[in-house]
Image (spheres, rainbow, N blue to C red):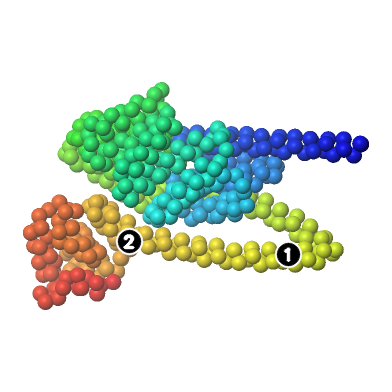
Amino acid sequence: MMRIVLSVLLFVLVSCHSHTKKEAEKKFDTGLLKQNEKFRLGGEYDSLINLNKRYYKQADQMNYEDGKALCYINLAELNISLENFQKSQILFDNAKEILDDSEDNLHKARFYNVYGRFNIELRRLDKAFQYNNEAMSFIKKSDNSELKNDILFSIYLRQAIYLIQKKEYEKALEYFHKAKKLDDTGLADCAISDYVYMHKDKDSAYKYITIAYNKANIGGKEDGIALYANTIMGEYFLNYKQYDKAEIALNKALKINEKTKRIYAYYAKYIYNDLRVLYERTGDKEKAYLYLKAYTDAFYKTNTSLLATINQDMESFIAVTQKDANHHKSKIYWIVSLSCIGLVLLGLYAWRIIIALRKRKKILAIEAENLKIRMNDNKQEEIIDLGKRNDPEFLNRFKETYPEFIAQLLTISPNLENSELIFCAMLKLHFTSKEIANYTMVQHRSIQQKKYRIRKKLNIPGETDIYHFFDTLK
C-alpha cells in the first residue's frame, strides 16, 4: 500500500514539475518574441541586442534549448535587415541545429518564415517559397497560443510578397488580405498599397496608403511602420506629380530613418533616390545632386562603421554561446569518459557521434563556401537590374565588377564620356538596341547612331559584330 502511495505522489510531483516547466517556457517565448518585435519595429538596436543576450542566458539557466534557438533567429533576422548575410547564415545554422531535435511546431514555423526571407534577399525565390510553405505547414500543426497569430501574420505577408514575384497576383492579394485580418498596426495596409501602387490603380492605392499612413502616424510614431508608410506615401505623390506633398512625406521618412537606421539601414538609399528624382523633376539641380551623392554613399558604404559595430556585437554574442557550447561539450566528455569504464558500447556510440559531428562540420564549411559563390553570382544580376532601371549607380557597380574592361576602353579612346561608357557597359551585358532604347527612354534610331559613333571611337571594323568585340575585352 505504501509503495502505491509513493508512486502516485512521485507521478504527481513529476507532472506538476513538467507543467510548471512548460508554463515557464511559454512565458519565456511570449516575453522574448513580443519585446523583440517591439524593439525591431521601433528601430531600437541596443535594446534588441541586450534583450536577446539576456534571454539567451535565461534559456541556459532554464536548460531551454529552444529558447536559445529563438534568440539566434531574432539576431539572424536583424542581420538580414542590415544586409549582413554571412552573420545571418551562422546564426540560422545554430538555430537549425537545435530545432532539428525540437518538437515545437511554433518555433519551427518562426524559423522557416524568417529563413525564407533570408533566401529572398539572396535572390533564391523558389527556396524562399519552399521555406515559407514549410512555415505554413508547421504553424497549422501548432497549438493555439498568444504568439500563433503574430507568426501567422508574418507567414501570410511573406507568402503574398513571394507570389507577386511569381506573378501570381490574385493569390498574392488573397494572402495580403489574410494578413490584414491579423494586423492592426498598418503594416499590412502599407504592403497592400505598395502592391496596388505598382499596378497603377491610383484610387485603391491612395485608399490603402492613407489608412496605413494615418495608423502609422498616430501619436507621432517614429518606427519601422511609419518609415514604410511615409516612404510609400512619398512615392505615391511623386508618381502622380504632387511634388509638394511628396517632399513633406519623404522628408518625414528621412527624419524617421535617422532614428531607426541601426535596424532599417537599407531604407536610406531608397529615400535618397526618391528625393533625387523629386528635385530633378522640380528643377532644383543643387538638391538633386546632393541627394544623388547621398544615395551613392549610402549604396556603397552600407554603413561600414555600423556593420563593424554589428559584427563586434555578433562576435561577442557568438563567443558567449560558443563558450556555453564548449562548457556543455566538456560535461559530455567527462560523462562519456566515466561511462566508458563500465560501458564500452556507450563509448563506441559516442565515437560515432563525434565522427558524425566532424562530417557535419565539413558539410557546413562546403555550404558556407557555396553561399559565398552564390552571393558573388548575384552581383551580375544586380548590375543588370540597375541597367534596366537606368539607375545612376549602374556604371559604378559595373566598374567594380569589370574594372579591366573600362580600363581597356579608355586605353583605346581616352576621351570616352560617362554616357558612352554606360552605353558600352550595356552592350557588354548583351542588352539589345531595343532594350537600351526602352531603358534609357530614347528612340531606337538614336541607339543605332550611338553604335556608329562608338565604332568610330573604338576603331571597330564594320564587318566585326559589336557584341563580339566587347566579349573579347575582359
Is 210 drawn above or below residue 392 in the view shown?
above
Q: Position of residue 444 (x, y in %)?
A: 10, 58
Q: Quadrant of residue 281?
A: top left
Which mark is drawn over residue 380?
2
Is 3 drawn above or below residue 460 in the view shown?
above
Q: Position of residue 221 (x, y in %)?
A: 41, 27
Q: Position of residue 249 (x, y in %)?
A: 29, 31
Is residue 405 shown left or right of residue 99?
left
Residue sitting at x 60%, y 44%: 104
Question: Which secondary structure lies at badge 1?
Answer: helix
Residue sitting at x 45%, y 62%: 372
Q: Nearer the viewer, residue 372 or 50?
A: 372
Question: Which secondary structure lies at badge 2?
Answer: helix
Of the numbered discs 1 and 2, the one sitting upstream in the chain is 1
On-image quarter of the N terminus: top right
Residue sitting at x 37%, y 35%: 177
Q: Residues within 10 Å of mark 1 (few under 14, many from 20)?
A: few
Q: Nearer the viewer, residue 2 or 298?
A: 2
Is residue 396 shown left or right of residue 423?
right
Q: Nearer the viewer, residue 197 or 181?
A: 181
Label 1 to label 2, Cα distance in Å? 48 Å
Disc 1 residue type? Tyr
Is residue 120 shown left or right of residue 386?
right
Is residue 49 shown left or right of residue 421?
right
Q: Which residue is labeled 1 in the image? A: 349
Which mark is drawn over residue 89?
none
Disc 2 residue type? Gln
Is 168 drawn above or below residue 177 in the view shown?
below
Residue most extreme to the right: 2
Residue sitting at x 38%, y 29%: 216
Is 203 drawn above or below residue 318 in the view shown?
above
Q: Nearer the viewer, residue 287 or 366?
A: 366
